[in-house]
Image: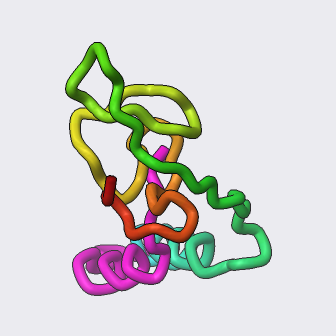
Amino acid sequence: MRLIDADALANVIETNCPALNFAALLSKGWVLSLIRDKTNTPTVELKRGKWIAAWFDSRPVCSECGKFADERTDYCPNCGAKMDGGDEDAGDD
């Protein structure tokens, strides 16, 4: 799962995707309306976890999904949990 910044995505589309014809203009407008329509946007409960060191592997393990990651990041690349350990800073042991 990848979480995105919808406002940043809309900005990129507006800036970098010119409407070459009427159909493209309609498509661009439709995509932007979907991104900006917060009433139809599915919400996801933010999971919070921490990286756990496995004794048999050097890679960190997510406390939420139990899967390995290649490196310690702010979010688990497998389940999207925010790796702040609750009150601790992201990525800290």
Q: How many numbered markers are drawn?
A: 0
Quadrant in the rendering for residue 68: top left
Q: Residue furthest right?
A: 39
Q: Write the residue at 68% across / 78% down.
A: 37
Q: Is the residue 2 above or below the residue 30 in the image?
A: above
* Residue 84 % position (x, y): 46, 62
Q: Write the residue at 45% across / 56% down.
A: 83
**Viewer-nearest residue: 53 or 31:** 53
Q: Write the residue at 34% across / 33% down.
A: 53
* Residue 13 % position (x, y): 34, 76
The residue segment tinted magenta is 1-23
* Residue 34 % position (x, y): 62, 71
Q: Residue furthest top?
A: 56
Quadrant in the rendering for residue 21: bottom left
**Viewer-nearest residue: 87 or 64:** 87
* Residue 77 % position (x, y): 39, 42
Q: Can the viewer see residue 23? A: no
Colouring chosen for the image of the structure: rainbow
Q: Is the residue 8 above or below the residue 3 in the image?
A: below
**Viewer-nearest residue: 48 or 39:** 48
Residue 4 inside the magenta-drawn segment: yes
Q: Write the residue at 70% across / 67% down.
A: 41
Q: Is the residue 73 above or below the residue 6 in the image?
A: above
Q: Can the viewer see residue 89? A: yes
